Amino acid sequence: QEKVQQSPESLIVPEGAMSSLNCTFSNSASQSIWWYQQHPGKGPEALISIFSNGNKKEGRLTVYLNRASLHVSLHIRDSQPSDSAVYLCAVKTSSGQKLVFGQGTILKVYL
Amino acid sequence: NSKVIQTPRYLVKGQGQKAKMRCIPEKGHPVVFWYQQNKNNEFKFLINFQNQEVLQQIDMTEKRFSAECPSNSPCSLEIQSSEAGDSALYLCASSPRINQDTQYFGPGTRLLVL
């Protein structure tokens, strides 16, 4: 069964800083890896996904995937207080199309 | 922004009572997923549909949980006999296709079983 672990559990950064979040998964054959953002009282919202080794950039977000080390990271450049939320790493499994989520990283960006 | 609609937003039930929640997927999305998110942020996949057909479900769903996605009606998830451990946020997500596509989540139904 696919397992997803995220670190750190929480991250506090000042406005304008880079926020770096990490995720490891257990199956190198996993189809794609997604990062979701969840604000209190709301459902998760997809931010960015990656399938191939390497990096992908969208706006202030950059994601890096290394399938050999089973590691993916999300970097948020110029962090803003509105980025404060729970960030969830999710892996779409090869057996069925469900997402397997990590336990999340709580990000707080202060002024 | 997701256009998945979930009702009710909050549901309070006693142990042994039925709990039913509904989901209207985004227009044009034939694929629907149900997940349970507990207070520790642990997600559990429950069931998914393509149109009215069940694609995959976990054993837990087969016992006390039932779900359906009838044509021209909201999808629903029902717990036949609620237990305290069922207290959680139930999230519905929809997707335009089964492979590779983003899953768009609704705001969830928060169930509290007293």
Image: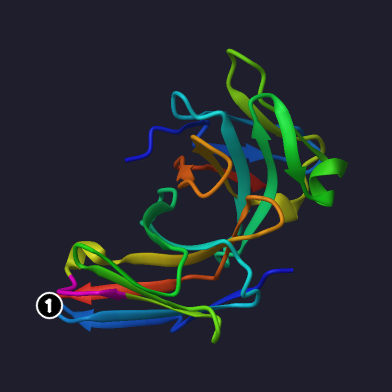
Q: Quadrant of the N terminus of chain B?
A: top left
Asked if one can make out residue B91 in the rendered structure from this viewpoint, the answer is: yes
How is the structure coloured here? rainbow
The x and y percentages for residue B69 are: 66, 25
* B44 sits left or right of B23 in the view: right
Question: Against A24, is A104 above or below?
Answer: above
Residue under pointer 1:
A16
Q: Give the range drawn in magenta.
A: A75-79
Q: Is the magenta stretch mostly helix, strand or loop?
A: loop
Question: Against B17, is A43 above or below?
Answer: below
The x and y percentages for residue B111 are: 61, 44
Residue lying at 64% horizontally and 25% vertically, measured from the top left: B51
Question: Against B35, is A76 above or below?
Answer: below
Q: Which amino acid is tagged 1?
A: Gly
- Residue furthest toward the top? B72
Question: Against A90, is B91 above or below?
Answer: above
Q: Is residue A77 magenta?
A: yes
